[in-house]
Amino acid sequence: MSILKFIIVGAAVGYGINYITKKNADGRSIIEDLADNAPDWFEKAKHLAQDALGKVSQTAEEVRANF
């Protein structure tokens, strides 16, 4: 039973790798698109984290002032 699981998981991984590296109509793969967009997503995530941290510190200051 264990070997059957490994065969199924291996086939799924192989299919997934084939799918994300396959070129589409414009000659680019999914992985290339992800690699190109990663820096933009990182910057957006950084700004969102800074905003969240600001909101948390503001709430903490309000709680401390009311305590």
Image (tube, rainbow, N blue to C red):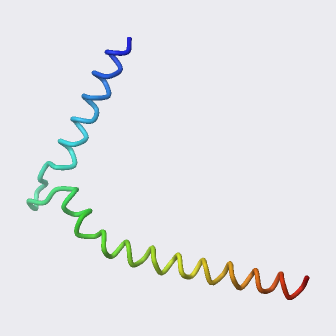
Q: Residue furthest bottom?
A: 65
Q: Image quarter for residue 34? A: bottom left
Give whichever of 4, 23 is nearer the camera: 4
Q: Position of residue 50 (x, y in %)?
A: 54, 81
Query: In the figure, residue 32 lies in which quadrant?
Result: bottom left
Vertical side of 13 occupied by 40: above or below: below
Instruction: Answer with left or right where residue 51 lies relative to residue 28.
Output: right
Circle count: 0
> Where residue 17 sits: x, y (%)?
21, 43
* Percent coordinates x, y for residue 14 in the rendering: 21, 35
| Quarter of image, res 60 | bottom right
Q: Please, is residue 67 above or below residue 13 in the view? A: below
Question: Residue sitting at 22 percent across and 49 percent down?
Answer: 20
40, 54: nearer the viewer = 54
Classify residue 48 as left or right of residue 56.
left
Residue appearing at x 86%, y 88% in the figure: 65
| Residue positioned 30% across, 74% down in the render | 39
> In what quadrant of the picture does the N terminus appear?
top left
Residue 67 against residue 12 in the figure, above or below: below
* Image quadrant in which the C terminus is located: bottom right
Left or right of 44, for residue 56: right
Farthest-out residue, right: 67
How far from the left and from the top, in percent, is residue 4?
32, 15
| Residue lying furthest left | 27
At horizontal 83% and vertical 81% (from top left) the residue drawn is 63
